[in-house]
Image (cartoon, rainbow, N blue to C red):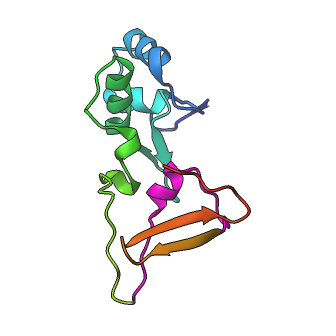
Amino acid sequence: MTATPATQVELATERLVGDELISFVKKNSSLSKTDLAKAAGYYTIDKDGSVRCSITAMLGALSEASGFSFGNDASRVGVAGRKLSNRARVQGNGNLLVGKAYTKMLGLESGAEFEIKLSKQTGNIRLVPVGGAEDEE
């Protein structure tokens, strides 16, 4: 931890989570939200060296640690928190894009190769890993 020049609160090197965060907040309830965020690791340092507190992130982690959920199903949330629709649209240039959220859900790595199998009757597109066995669903 390093001391901030503006206050005597030390900046944490890692964000506290779970029971550790709850315990820390209870022990330091006299601190302001800003100081709690800094001391619990919920901050970023800007290019100019100033400290920016992430109070909302800290309060979210604190509510999660307390067992409160906002109803988000992490497996159904994509990039930027948008819900996945399991739909795709052919783009104006003719491309059909499979987004990062879907490749992440499948555990696909950059550079993975697939054979494309098309069914004109049903309109199905199947991606089969090159050199891998086909899975039937």
The part of the image, by quadrant, that contains residue 33 is top left
**In the rendered view, would you say 40 is above or below 84?**
above
Q: Residue at x 45, y 36 (%)?
A: 42
Q: Is residue 109 above or below residue 4?
A: below
Residue 112 is a magenta residue: yes
Q: Is residue 133 left or right of residue 3?
A: right
The furthest residue to the left: 70
Q: Is residue 20 visible?
A: yes
List x then y, in percent, for residue 35: 40, 29
How far across and how far down the image is residue 28, in percent? 40, 14
The N terminus sits in image quarter: top right
The correct choice, above or below, for 112 with respect to 119 in the image is: above
Question: Which residue extends farthest bottom?
Answer: 93
Residue at the image point whose x is 48% and y is 74% from the top:
118
Residue 40, horizontal then vertical, whole percent: 47, 27
Q: Quadrant of residue 116?
A: bottom right
- Residue most extreme to the right: 131
Which is nearer the eye, 81 or 84? 84
- Residue 11 vs 92, above or below: the answer is above
Q: Is residue 35 magenta?
A: no
Q: Residue at x 48, y 27 (%)?
A: 39
Highlighted magenta segment, given as a residue range = 94-113
Q: Residue 49, can we see it?
A: no
In this rendering, position of residue 51 left or right of residue 26: right
Residue that appears at 64% across and 58% down: 109
**Whole-percent x and y of residue 111?**
68, 67
Tally of marks: 0
Chief SS of the magenta region: loop
Name of the residue lying farthest toward the front? 121
